[in-house]
Amino acid sequence: MIKRLAVIGVGLIGGSFSLALKAAGKVEHVVGVGRDPENLQLALERGVIDSFTHRVEDAVKDADLVFIAVPLGSMTTIFEAIRPVLGKDTVFTDGGSVKGSVVASVRSVFGEIPANFVPGHPIAGTEQSGAGAAFATLYNQRRVILTPQPETSAEALELVSQAWQACGAEVICMDTGHHDEVLAATSHLPHMLAYSLVDSLAQMKENDEIFRFAAGGFRDFTRIASSSPQMWRDICLANREHLGTMLGRFADELNLLAEALKNGDGETLLNQFERAKAARDRYIDGV
Amino acid sequence: MIKRLAVIGVGLIGGSFSLALKAAGKVEHVVGVGRDPENLQLALERGVIDSFTHRVEDAVKDADLVFIAVPLGSMTTIFEAIRPVLGKDTVFTDGGSVKGSVVASVRSVFGEIPANFVPGHPIAGTEQSGAGAAFATLYNQRRVILTPQPETSAEALELVSQAWQACGAEVICMDTGHHDEVLAATSHLPHMLAYSLVDSLAQMKENDEIFRFAAGGFRDFTRIASSSPQMWRDICLANREHLGTMLGRFADELNLLAEALKNGDGETLLNQFERAKAARDRYIDGV
């Protein structure tokens, strides 16, 4: 049982973590921290949190667990705010989509990796954001990746693992760099492609007409282009090295297709489409 | 009322056209044509068609309307088969995703564009195929683009328009080349990107693990990569000119992003993501 949980950033990710733990009966009091008073008020009214404050320090003091669910670009500011007030027994974790940059940020602010820090990333979300979008089952049967550091204590890891499991999630531990490589492939690159596609089309002269004739495939394909631009700018910058590698790999593949298209080479097109369909169908069977 | 409808290619597109017209009470008898006996038998059992034959000639004779819903690569073969037996009063139309290549094929087989030919393209579909996937409401509130030629008779155009409207669709007439340009942007390019992305990932060493950590965004983004590879090879080849232009435009946009990423230029990333989100949100509001 967590007596006092501090959620810094009461949006979709932070708010859903709180709602899931409340639904599981695993938390007594949740204090939310944020900059937007309207969002915090909404969170309070929806029962996402039990109280709120605008001062990180007040929330963190006496908390058993601190969950930091702010955009990657704000992580360092938060770490700087909590460092002076963090109690010895307070475990802190985060929900950032890139783990290398968060770990580096903690190391630079604290001068080391504290034993009670557990880097984490829930593989879940929607294109919505804010406390109004939070719901208790967001993490149900989803995976949460933790990237504990050599300095991370077994007790801290255990507490964070149990919290995520109480949310219905499967917890997996992974190397920090490997996490960032895998996510560049399955999440960060697709977001860049969806944004690029929609922007390419929006810049065409007849763009209103073009969108008018888009079908269901287009709607699904571009759903992630409705995600928060600020959040995704931060993610792309934070994971620029791995993402750059994936972008290069994708560009090579696309060049091969363009070349085959130019040459009327149907066999190359078919081979690629067949490989992709087989992989995609295998993936769907495994979900 | 259509007395006899011949559906050549009883898959998702052809079968759903038949089911929709039957549901609307607008057709007396539907004869299906195809090469796969099991698929035709299934179509008969599901009430998608009333009879079937493997000989195009037998189906087309005495039909009021012929709907050709075969992959683009098979269109010419079908046109060659129907030409000798096509009655003067039989109107024929198709559901091909590229219209320039279909019109060219008809012109080459018939030596001209017959007055009773109406090129068409329903903007609807799922990643499923076959008669088992057909359903009566596929075209409900969807758009169907017709690209009548100068030679197309007003009567033929009227018959085909009414049939699609009876299926619940909105009918729009468009220039042939413009259709192919618009569809390259909204449909053909997204399919190429989805196939390329999945194939890029599938070729990575740890590909099973990578797919394991894919979230909902990836599933939606890549849904269209489960579409029929043969069908999409045909579409890409048939629309290679417009698709090549769109691919080039997209590659330029992606290069700008890669450059911004390399330079840590968050402003360029943010601007592009914001433009894309605004366009995508406008599009969704308009659907």
Image: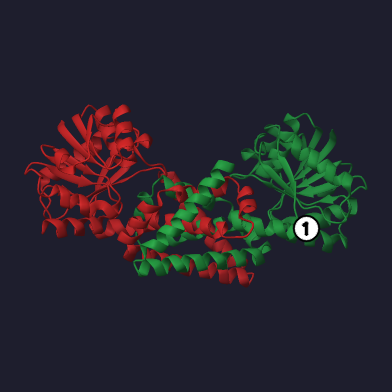
Chain colours: A green, B red
Q: Position of residue A160 (x, y in %)?
A: 80, 43
Q: Nearer the viewer, residue A130 or B263?
A: B263
| Rendered residue at 69%/58% (across/down) | A180
Occupied quadrant, residue B266: bottom right
Q: Secondary structure at mark 1?
A: helix
Q: Is residue B217 visible?
A: yes
In the depicted view, which residue is nearer to us: A281 or B235? A281
Residue A100 placement (x, y as % from top left): 74, 60
Give the residue furthest to the right.
Answer: A88
Name the residue type under label 1. Answer: Thr
Residue B180 in picture, x, y percent from top left: 30, 58
How would you rate the neighbour count of disc 1 (Cα within 10 Å): few for under 14, some for 14-19, many for 20 or more?
A: few
Q: Chain of mark 1?
A: A
The C terminus of chain A - image quarter: top right
- A157 lies left or right of A252: right
Q: Position of residue A279 (x, y in %)?
A: 53, 51
Q: Residue at x 22, y 26 (%)?
A: B25
Residue A287 visible in this rendered orientation of the protein:
no
Task: Count how many numbered circles sit on residues in the image.
Answer: 1
Q: Farthest left residue? A: B88
In the rendered view, tell whether residue A205 sits above or below residue B52: below
Q: Nearer the viewer, residue A22 or B164?
A: B164
Q: Is B230 positioned to the left or the right of A57 in the image?
A: left
Q: Which residue is mark 1?
A: A77
Image position of B160 (left or right of B40): left
Which of the image's four quarters has the N terminus of chain A? top right
Position of A206 with respect to A125 (left or right) is left
Q: Residue at x 57, y 51 (%)?
A: A227
Q: Residue B65 falls in which quadrant of the image? A: top left
